Image (spheres, rainbow, N blue to C red):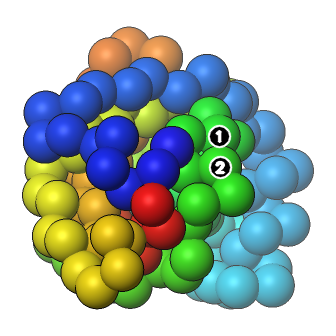
Amino acid sequence: MRFSEFKVGQRYETKSIKLSKETIVDFAKIYDPQYMHIDEEKAKQGRFGDLIASGMQTMSVSFKLWVEEGIYGENVVAGTGMNNIQFIKPVYPDDELRVVVEVIEILPKRRGNGIVTIQLNTYNQHDVQVFQAELSALIDN
């Protein structure tokens, strides 16, 4: 979409994706090698009672699902920021995540382009919110 087509209040819902235990462990071994993400036995004795996905993985998956919707298309120039990032609930193996996206701010810039800020709200298969963040991107017109 072109910058001029975005309006505050627009809402979108992404497809869903299931995170397997293997996907969680593989991601964490590279990017967040803490015991609650990679050591199943130790994780079962911890606060969450099982392995959980890294918050960084939940954020990345949420962003992936949004981008794959193709709303920005070829008009996206670059991301400009993320704010108010909240890891609300843990994500467990075999959780299925989907994202509800809402346009929350439009900021016109020069040459007809501008900054579009969206709120990503990520839910599991039980409709429990697990993640939330505001994401801004520069969009061409």
Q: Amino acid at mark 1?
A: Gly
Relative image position of residue 2 (x, y in whole percent): 46, 50
- Alpha carbons under labels 1 and 2: distance apart: 5 Å
Residue 127, x across and y down, in percent: 32, 17
- Looking at the picture, does residue 89 appear above or below residue 123? below
Q: Residue at x 69, y 57 (%)?
A: 74
Determine whether label 1 and label 2 are within 8 Å by CB: yes
Q: Secondary structure at mark 1?
A: loop
Q: Quadrant of residue 43?
A: bottom right
**Pointer 2 residue:** 73
The foreground one among 122 and 140 is: 140
Q: Position of residue 31 (x, y in %)?
A: 70, 85
Compared with residue 50, is residue 86 higher up or lower down, i.e. above or below?
A: below
Residue 70 is labelled as 1
Task: Check disc 2 and report its element: helix, strand or loop.
Answer: helix
Image quarter hosting the C terminus: bottom left
Q: Position of residue 59 (x, y in %)?
A: 49, 62
